[in-house]
Amino acid sequence: MDEDVPVITIDGPAAAGKGTVARLVAGQLGFRLLDSGFLYRRAALATIAGGADSGNADDVVAAIAAIDWDAGCDEQRLRSEAVGAAASQLAALAPVRRELVAVQRRFRTAPGLVADGRDMGTVIFPDAFLKIFMVADLAERARRRLRQYPGLGMDECLAALRERDEADRGRPVAPLRPAEDAVQLDSTGLDAQSVAERIVDLCRQADPGRFKVE
Ligand code: DC
């Protein structure tokens, strides 16, 4: 791990807007982007495609070993709530998380990294320069999810998000929780651009030399 390379972590519950905001912040700073949920979702797709069980650590670790990370995959399916739920299930297994630690840390390259997920600030990059914990009202998160991926009903979507958050928060390994030194941001009622600007401002306040105002 190159500890001189600054990392900004954005953790939080499902559909809080982390992905969009992380992309905007990375774009503004010229940093690399790690969507760690993608890795867990890709592992879930591979497990399901092989007819294996997302609750069985050996099966999932074998499915991960066979993934060709450079190959494309069905994005629509990857982003579905069903694959999100399977990702959440296999993400609770310690051997599966161990398998993905090095993969995630390899994203840390100059000039910097913006990483979004559940345990970016607590486990994967505990020495991050800035840690954000992003939240939003459940109803707003469901509305955003439905706008991006129509197909579920509102009630189903609310129930699926609630269930996934509970599973991610309640698991013993790398549970979803704010790091002690995280800044909490509530994105309810805000657009992604304003949240991203707030994060870039926090970077400038923390290190005006490195993050110059243009
Ligand atoms: O962010 P997402 O909805 O794409 O993530 C899908 C699931 O993957 C999420 O419910 C839990 C798991 N996950 C995780 O455990 N740790 C991460 N850093 C990212 C995702």
Image: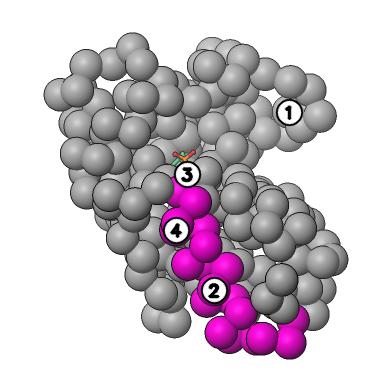
Which residue lies under the disc numbered 3? 91
Contact check, label 4 and label 2, Cβ < 8 Å: no
Q: Are marks 4 and 3 in contact (CB under 8 Å)?
A: no
Asked whether 29 falls inside the magenta stretch, the response is no
Label 1 vs 2, first from the N-terminus = 1
Which amino acid, mark 1? Ile
Q: Secondary structure at mark 4?
A: helix
Q: Residue furthest right?
A: 110
> Which quadrant would residue 204 be assigned to in this image?
bottom right
Q: Are marks 3 and 2 in contact (CB under 8 Å)?
A: no
- In space, the residues marked 4 and 2 are separated at their CA atoms by 10 Å
At label 2, counting other C-alpha atoms closer than 10 Å, the crowd grade (few under 14, some 14-19, many 20 or more) is some
Q: Looking at the image, tell me whether mark 3 or mark 2 is earlier in sequence order.
A: 3
Residue 205: image location, x then y, percent: 56, 84
Q: Which residues are magenta?
A: 192-210
Q: Nearer the viewer, residue 30 or 1?
A: 30
Q: CA distance from mark 3 to mark 2?
A: 32 Å
* Mark 3 residue's CB less than 8 Å from ligand 1: yes
What is the x, y in percent for residue 19? Answer: 52, 45
Estimate how packed mark 4 is, as few (under 14), some (14 to 19) or many (20 or more) residues with alpha carbons within 10 Å. many
Disc 1 target residue: 67
Give the mark, 4 or 2, whose residue is nearer the N terminus: 4
53 to the left or right of 189: right
Q: Give the mark, 3 or 1, whose residue is nearer the N terminus.
A: 1
Residue 195 is tagged as: 4
Counting from the top left corner in percent of width and height, residue 144 is at: 34, 33
Q: Which residue is mark 2?
A: 201
Tell me the distance, in whole angstroms, between the alpha carbons under discs 4 and 3. Answer: 27 Å
Q: Is residue 181 above or below residue 121?
A: below
Quick one: SS at disc 3?
loop
Q: Amino acid at mark 2?
A: Asp
